[in-house]
Every structure is written in C-alpha cells, then in structure tokens.
C-alpha cells in the first residue's frame, strides 16, 4: 500500500469496518472478565445493597459521559490513533507522544497481560487443569500454565489481525455475539426462571455501613470493568462513513454494555446475599449454579474464557493503531508504520504490540498488570475529554458532525470521576502510582531526543 491510497482524512489504512462491526469492536473490547468477577470485590468493599447499586450506576454514568464526549472528537477527527490524535490536536505533540509512550511501556502490555491471563485461567479450569501449575523455568522466573497459554493467546490474535482488520472483525463479531448472548441469557434466566427458595428475600433491605475510602476503591474496580468505551476511536481510520458511524457506534455500544451490566448486577443480587457475594470471586458461576446446577459453572467458565478472548482480540485490533499513528508522525521507528500491501494491516505495529504483551504476561501477575493499566490510561482519558473544551475554544469553526450531548456538564462529570479515581490511587497505592507516572515522564527526554534526531535528519 502506498501513500497514493491515503484517504481524505490522511489515513493509509483501508476503511473496512461497517457500523455493526464497529459496535462489536467496542462491546467486545469492554465486556471481558470484569462483570463476571468484579462484583465480588465490590461487594466486599460496599456491603450495602443500595450503595452497591449506586456504585455500578455511577460507573455506567462515567462511562457514558466519556463515550458521549469522545464521540464528538472521533467524528471530528476520524483518523487512526484515536486518543493520540485527540491529544495532538488539543494539546500538541508532547502530550500525544507521552500517551503513545505510556501505551508502549505500561498501558498496552498491562492490558494484554491482564486480559489474556484471565482467559487462559478460565479455559484451563474448564478443561480441569491447574492454571497455577509451573510449566517452565527461565532463570529465576517460574512460568505457570496460565501465563504460557496467555502468551499463546496474545500471539494467536496477533496472527489473525496480521491478515487484516476484516479478519479480526470476523472473530470479533463472533466472540461478541457469543459473550453478549451468554450474559443476556444469564440475565434473562435470572429474572424469569423460577429459582424458588434461592431468590434472596428483601434484597434492598440489606444494609451495612460504608465509608468513603472503600467506596472509592470499589469505583476503581467498577471503572476497570466498564473500560473499553474509548477503544473504537483507535481504529477510526478504518471505519466506513466515520463521521456518521463512529458517534452512533460509540454511544450505542457503551449504552448497551451499561444496560447489560446493570441487568447482571440485579440478577446477582436477586440470587446471592450480599454477605455471601463478597466472598464469592466467581459470582457469575455461583449464580449460574443456582439457576442450572453444576453445568452452569462449566458454562460460565467457558463464557468467561470466550469473553476475555474476544476482549483480547478487540484490543489487538485497536491498540496497534496508536503505535502506527506515532510512527506515521515520525515519533516511532518507521518500521512500526509498515502496512501490508495485501491485507492493509499495520503489521509492524501489530508485531510490536504482540511482542510486548507476550513478554509482560510471562513475567508479571494479573493484579500488577491491571493496576498498571488503570493508572497509566486514566490521566490520558481525562486529557482527551478536556480536549473538547480546548478545541471548542480554539477551533470553533471545526466541522463537528456530532456535538457532545449535555455539554459542558457531561464532560465535566467525567473529569470529576477521573479526579476521584486517580486521587484514590495516589492515596492507596502511592508507590505504584509514582512508578507508573515516572515511567510515563521518562517519555519527555525520549521525545526531546526523537525531535532532535528528526530535525537533524531533515536538515
């Protein structure tokens, strides 16, 4: 593929994703393991049913506020790279580069590792194998079965996407349909199947004292479960009719996820007392067992494995486009911008992303991977939303096919949620927070050196 193929927005990648494939990318990137395991941790922190429900509603509101705001940016800048492009247009090249740098060293390897290790663990459990069994020793590093399989899953989705985003879209559409069907079936059965005495009486009368600090910690886990609403923007350069399809897909997909999640939460509450939910990490499996017996546990395990695998594929469809966009701007090596002439896939960026993810999952554990992702990405989510205010002021004549509903209240609500999230991490995990932010800050001298090299090369 040559530069003669660049479309009117400046992208070299072919636009092959239709509206429903775009929705599948967003939904598939969002629904992973979170809704199947996060409620237990939240219940342990927030054992009061009304407050527990409020936390999940607030998480959905924050996600919708982010989606409503990003829809304006995606329609105005339908280019490969998503948030990278929004930051570049709103705040200049340095913050945009720092986002790409953060994606390289912290965010994306953490996301790939956390997602793939859950998919691998559930797949092994369905097969009655021990996920934690050591299978390989490399020097001082002992690699468990779930880590090795997780690395293999990362490489598998990389191979699929190597042959073009339309191949990845087929896998994404299928996995998204399966995971949505599984979650919808759980919700439907939970509400309409007669579970007899298993239904918890007086659900909303279950009260317990809740303080601010545990509530904020719970919100971190909830926002992790809702994460994925921004991913579609990364492949904006490959969506057909982007100014029309991107806002609709972002808003519809996010709203659909919120509805499914809240339905699942209500089913869990209907079937499992709060006092028990907090100690039930496999809360979805427990609910399925009440409804369907032992076979329900197997079905939920398989559903989680498929669900997280689809999320991993969605992330492999979207995230390499960030590295591609940076390489197109000359901020990453030119090899990262390589596009396969036959498939139209950014194969250089896919290779880079898959390699990093496979290495990280072999040397780090799930909790550390999830934390490094959240701390790394949310400052940039907040900056992306803030870019709407900056661009409204600096570029009032910019073509905006969609304008954020509820502006300025909606983006301000998202920024408020971001402040609470990051502030809580700063207080509760100061060392992890400092290390991650420090690694991102290392990108500043890297950017200066890269800029000097570019200047010297063009002189």
Image: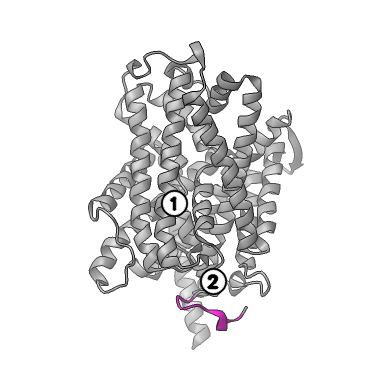
Tell me where residue 45 appears, x and y as whole percent: 40, 26
Q: Residue furthest top?
A: 197
Whether residue 347 appears in magenta in the rendering, the answer is no
Tell me where residue 337 appears, x and y as whole percent: 58, 72
Above or below for 298 versus 179: above
**Residue 58 seen in the figure:** yes
Q: What secondary structure predominates along the stretch shown in magenta?
A: loop
Tell me where residue 285 appears, x and y as whole percent: 58, 26
Above or below for 231 versus 348: above
Q: Quadrant of the N terminus?
A: bottom right
Q: Is residue 104 left or right of residue 250?
A: right
Q: Is residue 6 left or right of residue 361?
A: left
Whether residue 5 appears in magenta in the rendering, the answer is yes
Q: Residue at x 26, y 61 (%)?
A: 389
Q: Residue at x 46, y 16 (%)?
A: 199
Q: Quadrant of residue 305?
A: top right
Tell me where residue 97 appears, x and y as whole percent: 45, 65
Above or below for 150 versus 103: above
**Separation of marks 2 and 1 at Cα, in angstroms:** 20 Å
Q: Residue at x 40, y 67 (%)?
A: 243
Q: Callout 2: 10 Å neighbours few (<14), some, many (20+)?
A: some
Q: Judging from the image, what secondary structure is the residue with disc 1 in? A: helix
Q: Callout 1: 10 Å neighbours few (<14), some, many (20+)?
A: some
For marks 2 and 1, the one nearer the N-term is: 2
Of 344 and 402, the residue lying toward us: 402
Q: Quadrant of residue 383?
A: bottom left
Q: Which region is colored magenta?
A: 2-10
| Mark linked to residue 327 | 2
Q: Judging from the image, what secondary structure is the residue with disc 2 in? A: helix
Residue placed under numbered mark 1 in the picture: 377
**Residue 144 seen in the figure:** no
């Amino acid at each position: 593929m040559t530069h003669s193929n660049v479309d009117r927005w400046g992208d070299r990648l072919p636009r092959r994703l239709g509206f429903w494939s775009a929705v599948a990318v967003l939904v598939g990137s969002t629904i992973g393991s979170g809704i199947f395991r996060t409620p237990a941790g939240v219940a342990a922190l927030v054992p009061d049913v009304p407050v527990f429900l409020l936390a999940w509603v607030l998480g959905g509101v924050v996600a919708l506020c982010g989606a409503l705001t990003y829809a304006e940016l995606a329609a105005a800048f339908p280019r490969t790279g998503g948030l990278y492009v929004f930051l570049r247009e709103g705040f200049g090249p340095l913050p945009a580069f720092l986002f790409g740098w953060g994606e390289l060293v912290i965010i994306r390897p953490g996301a790939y590792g956390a997602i793939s290790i859950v998919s691998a663990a559930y797949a092994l459990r369905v097969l009655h194998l021990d996920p934690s069994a050591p299978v390989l020793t490399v020097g001082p590093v002992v690699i468990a079965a779930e880590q090795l399989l997780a690395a293999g899953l990362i490489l598998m989705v990389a191979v699929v996407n190597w042959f073009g985003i339309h191949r990845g879209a087929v896998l994404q559409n299928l996995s998204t349909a399966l995971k949505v069907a599984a979650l919808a079936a759980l919700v439907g059965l939970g509400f309409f199947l007669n579970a007899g005495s298993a239904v918890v009486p007086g659900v909303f009368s279950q009260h317990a004292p809740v303080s601010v600090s545990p509530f904020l910690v719970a919100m971190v886990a909830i926002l992790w479960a809702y994460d994925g609403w921004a991913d579609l923007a990364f492949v904006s350069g490959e969506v057909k009719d982007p100014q029309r399809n991107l806002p609709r897909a972002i808003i519809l997909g996010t709203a659909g996820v919120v509805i499914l999640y809240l339905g699942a939460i209500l089913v869990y509450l209907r079937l499992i007392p709060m006092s028990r939910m907090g100690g039930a990490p496999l809360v979805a499996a427990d609910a399925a067992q009440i409804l369907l017996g032992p076979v329900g546990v197997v079905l939920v395990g398989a559903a989680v494995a498929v669900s997280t695998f689809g999320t991993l594929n969605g992330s492999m469809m979207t995230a390499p486009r960030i590295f591609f966009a940076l390489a197109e701007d000359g901020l990453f090596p030119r090899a990262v911008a390589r596009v396969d002439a036959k498939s139209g896939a950014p194969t250089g960026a896919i290779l880079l992303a898959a390699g990093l993810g496979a290495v990280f999952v072999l040397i780090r554990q799930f909790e550390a991977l999830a934390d490094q992702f959240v701390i790394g990405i949310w400052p940039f989510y907040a900056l992306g939303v803030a870019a709407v205010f900056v661009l409204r002021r600096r570029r009032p004549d910019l073509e905006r096919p969609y304008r954020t509903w509820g502006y300025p209240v909606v983006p301000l609500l998202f920024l408020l949620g971001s402040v609470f999230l990051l502030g809580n991490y700063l207080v509760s995990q100061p060392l992890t927070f400092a290390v991650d932010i420090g690694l991102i800050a290392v990108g500043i001298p890297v950017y200066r050196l890269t800029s000097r090299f570019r200047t010297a090369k063009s002189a």
